[in-house]
Amino acid sequence: MTKLNFWNSTWALDEKQCPCDIHFLDYLDENGIKGCNIFHMGTGSHHIVGLRTASNGTNNQVLAITASRDEYAAYIDLLIDNPRLGFSYKAYFGDLYQTDARLLPTLDYATLFHAGEYRTSENDKYGALTDEQVGLVLAEKLNPGGEMHFYTGSFAYDVAKRVGESLVAKRGFSDAGTYKSLHIFRKPKA
Ligand SMILES: C[S@@+](CC[C@H](N)C(=O)[O-])C[C@H]1O[C@@H](n2cnc3c(N)ncnc32)[C@H](O)[C@@H]1O
């Protein structure tokens, strides 16, 4: 029987090993980003991106996906105990490679920190998108000037970089360089 290629694991915050979420929050902070819509791949069980955003007065909104049963359960518990969190942070369980533009809001930032890390032939069995296709779907939902962020420390950064290069070649994005461990691609303003 074909099964969803979910992540049968969980991830606690470990800034030394995987600082991408922290670096993304630093980026938002340093650039004074307020009132923006963020799509975030990979919540971790810590949910730091959604939690920090909900508590720092920025009015940023986060829609995040997890493919981990445990991480999703952690979100449910967080929300039950902090109902106000639900106004600005929505996490859902699913496979990133089933992303459909019709179900997404318009976005200012999209993170694909774990592009290429977990997509296997298991995803092919149910016709899932490729990394490049997911990048293009999210690119469509980004507002002009919006950004897609990748993680240079990923073991699949070669795949992530190819997704970014495809945004440049096919959608006219610019390579906006790096910030800490992140690689940023920006959608044209018009
Ligand atoms: C190593 S953890 C990193 C979590 C967090 N970004 C961090 O750096 O602390 C990888 C994350 O990718 C998510 N993930 C793995 N496969 C996925 C998929 N197919 N769709 C969506 N998320 C996925 C996992 O649920 C997990 O949150």
Image: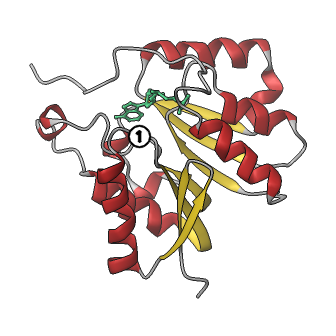
Using the rendered view, name the quadrant where residue 166 is placed: bottom left
Secondary structure under the numbered disc 1 in the rendered image: loop
Q: How is the image coloured?
A: secondary structure
Q: Is residue 52 left or right of residue 144?
A: right
Q: Is residue 126 left or right of residue 109?
A: left
Residue 163, x across and y down, in percent: 34, 61
User: Which quarter is ligand 1 in?
Assistant: top left
Residue 94, x across and y down, in percent: 39, 32
Which amino acid type is marked by label 1? Ser
State whether label 1 is within 8 Å of ligand 1.
no
Position of 53 relative to 145 (above/below):
above
Q: Dot 1, how many residues are within 10 Å of its Cα: few (below 14), some (14-19), or many (20+)?
A: some
Given residues 73 and 132, the one toward you in this image is 132
Position of 63 relative to 74 (above/below):
below
Quadrant where the C terminus lies?
A: bottom right
Using the rendered view, name the quadrant where residue 133 is placed: bottom left
Given residues 151 and 126, the one toward you in this image is 151
Q: Is residue 155 left or right of residue 180?
A: left
Q: Which residue is mark 1?
A: 154
Q: Tell me how many marks there are.
A: 1
